[in-house]
Amino acid sequence: MEAEKLTAIANAEVAVKVTDPKGAIDQYFAMTDNVGMFSIKVGLFVEGNYTVHVEYMGDGDRYLACEASTMLVCKPVLVPTTLVLTPSATEARVGDTVTITATLSS
């Protein structure tokens, strides 16, 4: 049995709904290109789980409606840190006491 070949749907409007972790919803619309693809840029400003829901309403003539959803996780930005050690001495004798000081910063 041969697999069915899919035909790209060009110049079709799709609706994209992005729900952030706090429940706020942003709605976008995009048009598919000549190979049926579209691309949008979405800013993620809240840490947590986002839901992305894309819907094509069909054309009322030939193509039926369809939809797809996915989840994405927005993780916090990791900030580089530095730890600087400053001993009171770099050499000591047996029985001496040295003070180790450190500064942690970002």
Image: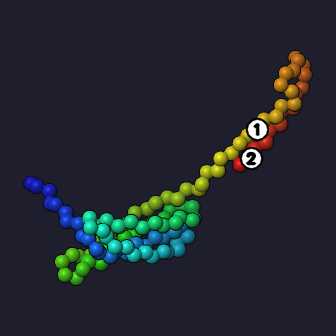
Residue 90 in sight here: yes
Residue located 46% across and 70% down the image: 18
Q: How is the protein colored in the picture?
A: rainbow
Amino acid of disc 1: Val
- The disc placed on residue 84 is 1
In the rendering, at what x and y percent does residue 85 appear? 78, 35
Q: Are marks 1 and 2 in contact (CB under 8 Å)?
A: yes
In the rendering, at what x and y percent does residue 20 appear? 51, 68
Residue located 83% across and 25% down the image: 90
Relative to 81, residue 13 above or below: below
- The disc placed on residue 34 is none
Residue 55 in sight here: no
Relative to 57, residue 80 above or below: above
Amino acid of disc 2: Ser
Relative to 13, residue 7 above or below: above
Find numbered disc 2 in the image and state the secondary structure of the residue it sits on: strand
In the rendering, at what x and y percent does residue 38 appear? 35, 67
Residue named by callout 2: 105
- Tell me which numbered mark, 1 or 2, is placed earlier along the sequence: 1
The foreground one among 4 and 8 is: 8
Which image quarter holds the N terminus?
bottom left
| Label 1 environment density (alpha carbons within 10 Å; few <14, some 14–19, many ≥20) | few
Q: Is residue 26 left or right of residue 13?
A: right
What distance separates the C-alpha of mark 1 from that of mark 2?
9 Å
Residue positioned most to the top: 94
Relative to 72, residue 67 above or below: below
Residue located 79% across and 42% down the image: 103
